[in-house]
Amino acid sequence: MRKMDAQTSETTGLLRAWAAGDRAALDRLAPRVYDELRRMAQNFMRGERAGRTIQATALVHEAYLRLIDVDNVEWEQRAHFFAVCAQVMRRILLEGARRRSRVKRGGGWERVTLEEFPGARGGRPEELIALDEALTRLSAADSRKAQVVELRYFGGLSVEETAAVLNVSPDTVARDWRLARAWLQSELE
């Protein structure tokens, strides 16, 4: 077994032990996944304007605090864990965006394409909320495509990791990714 496969298997084993109630497994797991979580948080924070209210490290710590209290999760694999982390980080940023937006009370909405979408990474709160609303509409129409966007765009998962989490082929993920991006771009224009 290659070194990376062994590390992935050990991480999966620690996730399963933690899910079974072994708090010591969580202590051993945290340093193994911290760098990847930090990379994910930095990915979320890319495009964030100066003077942002949360830093990547704080986002990781907030996500960690929310995850340590999660019970009854059957971690299927390492990619599943990171997919859940991506969802938690997205929710944290969205909550912050909604708080900031309530203070500003709207106005100045501007439509942009997905490629130009800094709000998806934590920029203007209105943009993040608009993307979340578009993803909610996409989820109602095709939940798997919405999950693909969440895992790939927000979570930074590869096509293969996304396929493993969703239990579909990489070709299906690639096709869903193309279609979902086109749909979202149309919605955001």
Image: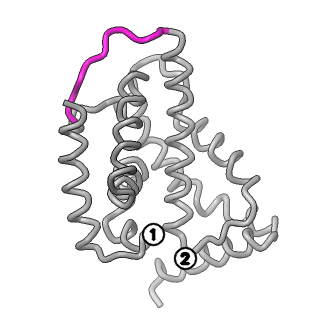
Q: Residues in magenta?
A: 104-113
Reply above or below: 171 against 130: below
Is 160 placed left or right of 94 in the picture? left
Look at mark 1 in the image and give the residue it sits on: 165
- Residue type pointed to by label 2: Gln
The x and y percentages for residue 40 are 46, 49
- Residue type pointed to by label 1: Val
What residue appears at the point 52 percent right and 37 percent down from the top-left corner? 56
Which structural element holds mark 1?
Answer: helix
Look at mark 2 in the image and give the residue it sits on: 7
The x and y percentages for residue 163 are 36, 71
Reply above or below: 151 against 136: below
First in residue order: circle 1 vs circle 2: 2
Along the viewing direction, whichever of 113 and 64 lies nearer the viewer: 113
Is residue 110 located in the magenta-colored stretch of the structure? Answer: yes
Whole-angstrom CA distance, mark 1 to mark 2, is 18 Å
